[in-house]
Every structure is written in C-alpha cells, then in structure tokens.
Amino acid sequence: MGKKAEISSELVLAIPRFIFLIIVLFSVVLLIKAFVKEKIEVKELESSIFFQRVLFGKGGIVWYDEASQRMHPGTIDLERFREAGNPQTQTNFLDNIFATYGEGNPILAAHLVLEMEGKPPLEAYYNKQNYFRWEPRTLSTVTGGSASVSSSKHASYVLVKDGDNLIPATLKATILS
Amino acid sequence: MLRKRGGLSKSKAGMTHDQFFIIFDLILAGVVFTSLLFFINGIKDNSIFERNYIARDTALLLNTLYAAPGDVSYLYKEPLQGQGKSNLLLEFSQGKATLTDINKKGQPIWYPFGMNKEIPLSQATFSSEDKNGLLFEKSHSGINIKAVKVSDLGQKS
C-alpha cells in the first residue's frame, strides 16, 4: 500500500473516533449540567402568599376602619369586593394599587369568589385579562398549554362587613401563576 | 492492508507517520481535558443559583411583608455572596429585586414583587461589603430596608 493511501485510510479511521469523542464530550457536559441546579420553583409559594395577602393585606378587600385607623384581617369589606368585581372594568384597585407587578403582570392572576349563605356568590378578578388568557393553559388537553401555567385553589372562612353587619362567609380563590 | 498504529512500525517514514498521529492524539486529549476543566471551573465559580435564590427569596419576603396587617421588622441574614466568595449587588427598585455579580459582570438576575402603592418602598442597593444583614422594616409610612451588623442587634431576628 502507498504512503498516500495509508494516510487517507488512517484519516478515514479517525472520523468515527472524532464522532465518538464529540458524543463523550457532550455526554459529560450534559451530565454536569443535569446536576447543576439553577432554577428555583416558587409559583406555589407565591400563590399562597398572594392569598394570604388578599386576606390580611392593606389596600385590598380587607375592611379598614377609618375611625380607629386599623385593619381587620380576615374581614372582607363587601363594598370594596363589589368594586373589585365590577364587570365593566378590565383592571381594578387590586391590579393598580394593591399588588402591582408592572405592565401586563406576567406573574399572577386570580379569580376570587365570595360565598355568603343565602346569597348568590360574588366574583372579582385580579389581573383579569391574563386570567382568561392563562386559564385554558392549565388544562392538560390544550395543545402546547399543558402545565405551562400552574393553578392552585385556596379557601378560607371569613367575615363580611356589610354595613353594620358581620356575615360569615367563605372566600375561595383560583390563582394562576 | 491497514497497518497497526503505534510504536511497532519498522520503517523510518512509518515512524514519523505514527508519531504524528500520537502527538495529534495527545494534543487533542490535552485540549479536551483543559476545556472540560475550564467548563467545570466556570460552573464552580458562577453565582447563578445564588442570584436566583436571593432574588426570589427577597421578592417573596417583600410580598410577605406587604401581606402583614401591622408593623413588621425582619432581619435577613443570607450573605450576599456567590460561590467562590464572589460579591453580589442587590437592588430593590421598580418592583424588582435584582442581583448582579460584581466580579463576573454577568447578566443581572431579577425577580418581581407586587408593590403596594399605599405602602411605598424606598429604593435601595446593597452589596456584600455592606455589613452582614438586611433589616426590613414595615410601618404605616412604608417599607424601609437598611444594611445592619447582625452582632449589633444581638442576634435579633
């Protein structure tokens, strides 16, 4: 066999070795990357904190007594809940004052339902536009939407301040994040 | 017929040819080994996890403070340092907790928190050189964050 032929045959034999080397290199890189944790999932915790915020936070739907200048955590001001649930508006004070995440709010959206005995349930939305946009994406049957938005349900017994009356009720929330 | 490579070649020309392949293999192994070492070293020294963690942690802490109905004082003792003791810069502004690695000058990592416009938050920037704790104080006038020495507070938390 000639020298040229010998060199070219060596080079041909080297090709599978190179391919194998690249595969091994990529495997090592992928293996290392698999063990390096960079992302931290906080969606569920964030949803839970938001629900607590709705129940206890200032500037939301919780009853604030002007006379004593104090909040009443866990007591919903019916007038403010109705204001938040105004179907005529896309945004309300929950979006613009209570918890503002900036333009478009890409973090959280919520549907709040206030159930009082003997009365029809009242509804209010936080980040209404995105709630309706994201809601279908929580379903596994939606193409390209499965699990891309997480949904969590929360509920708590509350009191509702309606004029001078305090009415026992349940506040339910579906929070998308 | 193909000749087996290695040091068993008889001819002078064959020796040169085989030596070339051996040297090439050694250089290749060296390049691969060095690049892998650089890659692992880069991962060891990067602070992406710490920046992600502190950005989320402080953003959630602020959300929790906004959720509290009364006045709150909370001492945050997590060091603003990445792996390899790289210094991090933490900034609270425009509804975001932003972490920047001072040494690496990498892309800042941020996480948003839901600002309450009735409870103003003072803009603030902190680095690991600013003592060793952050004191979050919420009162009727707003949320104020300042750097403190943990020892000065008698381990208050």
Image: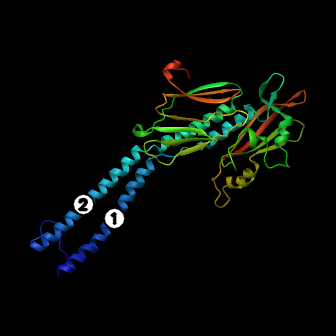
Closer to the camera, A122 or B68?
Answer: B68
Q: In which quarter of the image is the N terminus of chain B?
A: bottom left
Chain of residue at mark 1: A
Q: Position of residue A90 (x, y in %)?
A: 80, 50
Question: Do pointers 2 and 1 mark residues of a single chain?
Answer: no
Q: Which amino acid does label 2 sit on?
A: Ile
Residue B35 as seen in the image, left or right of residue A92: left
Which color scheme did the rendering employ for the protein? rainbow
Crowd around label 2: few <14 · some 14–19 · many ≥20 (10 Å): few
Residue B27, picture quadrant: bottom left
- Where does the image place residue B111, in percent across and percent down from the top left? 59, 43
Residue B33, horizontal then vertical, whole percent:
30, 54
Kindly identify the residue that appears in the image at 49 percent across and 40 percent down: B50
**What is the secondary structure assignment of the residue under circle 1?**
helix
Which quadrant, please, contains the C terminus of chain B? top right
Which of B87/B31 is in front? B87
Q: Reply above or below: A30 against A99.
A: below
Q: What residue type is labelled 1?
A: Phe
Please give the residue where the numbered disc 2 appears in the rendered image.
B27
Q: Where is residue A107 in the image (x, y as percent from the top left)?
A: 66, 46
| Residue under the point 31% across and 57% down | B32
Residue bearing mark 1: A20
Q: Can residue A116 be seen in this view?
A: no
At a point 85% along the width and 40% down the height, the residue shown is: A82
